[in-house]
Image: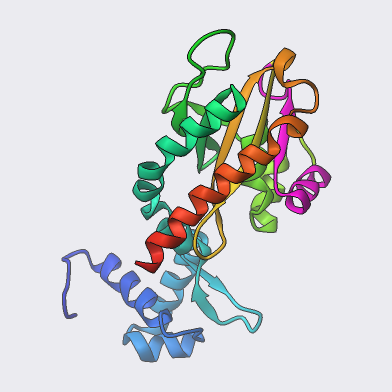
Amino acid sequence: MDNSSGVGVLDKAALVLTALESGPATLAGLVTATGLARPTAHRLAVALEHHRLVARDMQGRFVLGPRLSELSAAAGEDRLLATAGPVLARLRDITGESAQLWRRQGDYRVCVAAAERPSGLRDTIPVGSQLTMRAGSAAQILLAWEDPERMHRGLQNAAFSAAALSGIRRRGWAQSVGEREQGVASVSAPIKSPGGKVIAAVSVSGPLERLSRQPGRMHAPAVLAAAERLSESLRRAAAE
């Protein structure tokens, strides 16, 4: 095999992915394109499908899977983090509340950037904090645009419902009141990759006594504007 890494199974899996780069392929097509034995090609394609690196189209043909676009989006994380600081600081100053940037990692969401309210009662979330995907407005955002299967799994034991996520997709933002922590409210909006996939959430959070039981009425416009600025920065970077 040309350009062998010395790890045969990985080299063969790479052949399958490379073959699918040009479009959907039947098993016979994979065998022809890769030169692999039919049982080997089938075993690798099914294993890659398990990890969502390969999927099937409506005709049952193998295609590149959604996990690849997710990894591609994550590769843009440094660009997102590089532009997040000033946007979060502005959001904090406009709303008077702590602002955070969240990304999903498996069954958790991770705070990857934050701008804290400098004084007074505040919701402090250190960068690197891992929180559950079962509660909070950022969790709602990160789940609302997932594919149906992942959404269904994520809704198990969640503090919100499928109907709530449908409403979030319609209006474009989410709010939570005492959902993640008693006495805390938050508002979040999606950050989208140039391809339109939701890859992160931007939020403001603070005590319920300031944000009220309808925090979206107060802060949704500012949070949406911050999300759009961050999404636009990714679109500009992709066009460079």
Q: Quadrant of residue 182?
A: top right
44 up-or-down from 213: above or below: below
Q: Is residue 5 visible?
A: yes
Question: In the image shown, does 69 or 48 lie closer to the viewer?
Answer: 69
Depicted 209 relative to depicted 143: above or below:
above
61 w.r.t. 236: above or below? below
- Relative depth, front residue between 185 and 46: 185
Residue displayed at 67% across by 55% down: 149
Find out whether residue 171 is within the magenta segment.
yes
Which residue appears at 44% of the width and 54% of the height? Answer: 233
**Residue at image coords 50%, 68%:** 65
Image coordinates for residue 131, horizontal then vertical, percent: 55, 28
Q: Considering only vertical position in the picture, is 146 above or below 132?
A: below
Along the line of sight, which residue is nearer the eye, 237 or 50?
Answer: 237
User: Which quarter of the image is occupied by the C terminus?
Assistant: bottom left
In this rendering, position of residue 122 left or right of residue 221? left
Q: How many marks?
A: 0
Give the extent of the magenta segment.
162-181
For the N terminus, the quadrant is: bottom left
Residue 166 magenta-drawn?
Answer: yes
In the rendered structure, the answer to whether residue 141 lies left or right of residue 13 reads right
The quarter of the displayed image where residue 33 is located: bottom left
Image location of residue 124, percent across then percent down: 52, 17
Q: What x and y, as percent, mark residue 64?
A: 48, 73
Evaluate whether residue 158 shows in this view.
Answer: no
| Quarter assignment of residue 4 | bottom left
Could you tell me residue 20's position as x and y percent? Answer: 43, 80
